[in-house]
Image (cartoon, grey):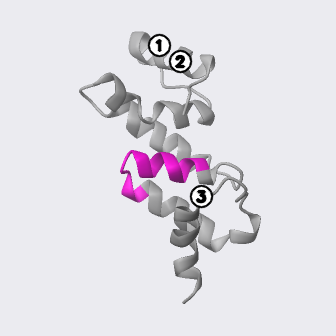
Amino acid sequence: MIPSLQSFDSLLRYIYYADVNMPPEDSLYLFSAPYFYGFTNNRLQAFCKQNLEMNVTFENVIQILEAADSMQATDMKNYALSLIVHHFPKVNIVCVNSQWLLCISAPLTY
């Protein structure tokens, strides 16, 4: 996932001013920043997780699911999967890979 200029600006504002006010799309990019840049605390990741959960939509839930999986954020991954399963007809599944279709469809078969 390639960060936008705006998300990089949000990262710099966090580093230099401890400012965590950012749009949800920046949180998606910056969720993995603590690991990538070797930050010693999880404050940015915790804020990004909270911001994503509060602003998840049917259009971005797949991206959030993939980000949560890559960061091994189990609770956020389960939250996204639950939203997808309960609102499957509304979710934009155009860009879902076959691995996620299997994860999503398993709870639907019971």
Q: Do the residues labelled 2 and 1 touch (CB within 8 Å)?
A: yes
Q: Residue 9, relative to residue 67: is it above or below?
A: above
SS assignment at label 3: loop
The residues tagged by marks 2 and 3 sit, at their Cα atoms, a distance apart of: 28 Å
Q: Pick out the residue farthest to the front.
A: 98
Pinpoint residue 67: horizontal percent, then vertical percent: 49, 45
SS assignment at label 1: helix
Which residue is denoted by mark 3 in the rendering?
97
Residue type highlighted by circle 3: Asn
Q: Do the residues labelled 2 and 3 touch (CB within 8 Å)?
A: no
Name the mark nearer the viewer: 3 or 1: 3
The residues colored magenta run: 63-75
SS assignment at label 2: helix
Pinpoint residue 102: horizontal percent, then vertical percent: 54, 71
Q: Residue 86, relative to residue 59: is it above or below?
A: below
Q: Pick out the residue farthest to the top.
A: 16
Pinpoint residue 8: horizontal percent, then vertical percent: 53, 18
Q: Pick out the residue farthest to the right.
A: 90
**Residue at left 70%, top 59%?**
93
Mark 1, residues whose alpha carbon is within 10 Å: few (<14), some, or many (≥20)? few
Which residue is denoted by mark 2 in the rendering?
8
**Residue at left 54%, top 59%?**
80
Which residue is denoted by mark 1 in the rendering?
12
Say which mark, if any, is on residue 39. Answer: none
